[in-house]
Amino acid sequence: MRAIFSILGLLVVVALVGFLAKKQLTDVSSISVQPQDGAQVLVPKTTPGATPQQQSEQIGQQVKQSIEAAMQQQRLGAEGQ
C-alpha cells in the first residue's frame, strides 16, 4: 500500500514538473515589454533555418536599430519641451 502511494506521488510530481517545463519553453518570440516611458520593446525575431551566426547578426542589427529609434524618439521629445 505504501509503495502504491509513493509511486502515485512520484507520478504527480513528474507530471507537474513536465507541465511547468512545457509552459516555460513556449515560444517567446512574440513577447513584448512595456517600459515605464511608454516605448514598446519587442524581442528580436530571426529567420527560421538560419545558421547561429546569421541569427546572432540579425538580432544584433535589430537591437541596434531599436536603440537608434529609441534615441531618436528621446531627441525629438527633448526638442519639443
Image (cartoon, rainbow, N blue to C red):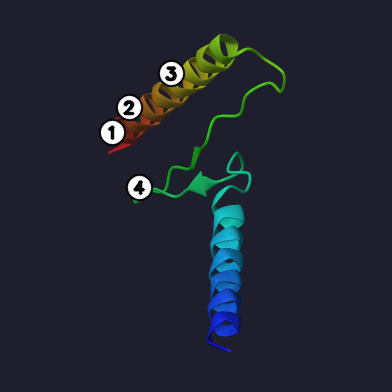
Quarter of image, res 67: top left
Q: CA distance from mark 1 to mark 3?
A: 21 Å
Location of residue 19 in the rendering, given as x and y in whole percent from the top left corner:
61, 62
Read off the residue under disc 3.
64
Which one is in front in this view, the residue at disc 3 or the one at disc 2? 3
The one of 21 and 78 positioned closer to us in this rendering: 21
Q: Give the amino acid type for the residue marked by disc 1 in the picture.
A: Ala
Comes first in the chain, label 1 or label 3 = 3
Q: Residue at coordinates 35% horizontally, 47% vertically from top-left? A: 37
Q: Are marks 4 and 2 in contact (CB under 8 Å)?
A: no
Comes first in the chain, label 3 or label 4 = 4
Q: CA distance from mark 4 to mark 2?
A: 14 Å
Read off the residue under disc 2.
75
Which one is in front in this view, the residue at disc 1 or the one at disc 4? 4
Q: Give the amino acid type for the residue marked by disc 3 in the picture.
A: Lys
Characterize the local packing of mark 1: few (<14), some (14-19) or many (20 or more) Cα atoms within 10 angstroms: few
Read off the residue under disc 1.
78
**Disc marking residue 35:** none
Q: Check the picture and name the quadrant holding the N terminus.
A: bottom right
Comes first in the chain, label 4 or label 2 = 4
Q: Are marks 2 and 1 in contact (CB under 8 Å)?
A: yes
Q: Secondary structure under badge 2?
A: helix
Q: Are marks 3 and 2 in contact (CB under 8 Å)?
A: no
Q: Are marks 1 and 3 in contact (CB under 8 Å)?
A: no
Which one is in front in this view, the residue at disc 3 or the one at disc 4? 3
Read off the residue under disc 4.
37
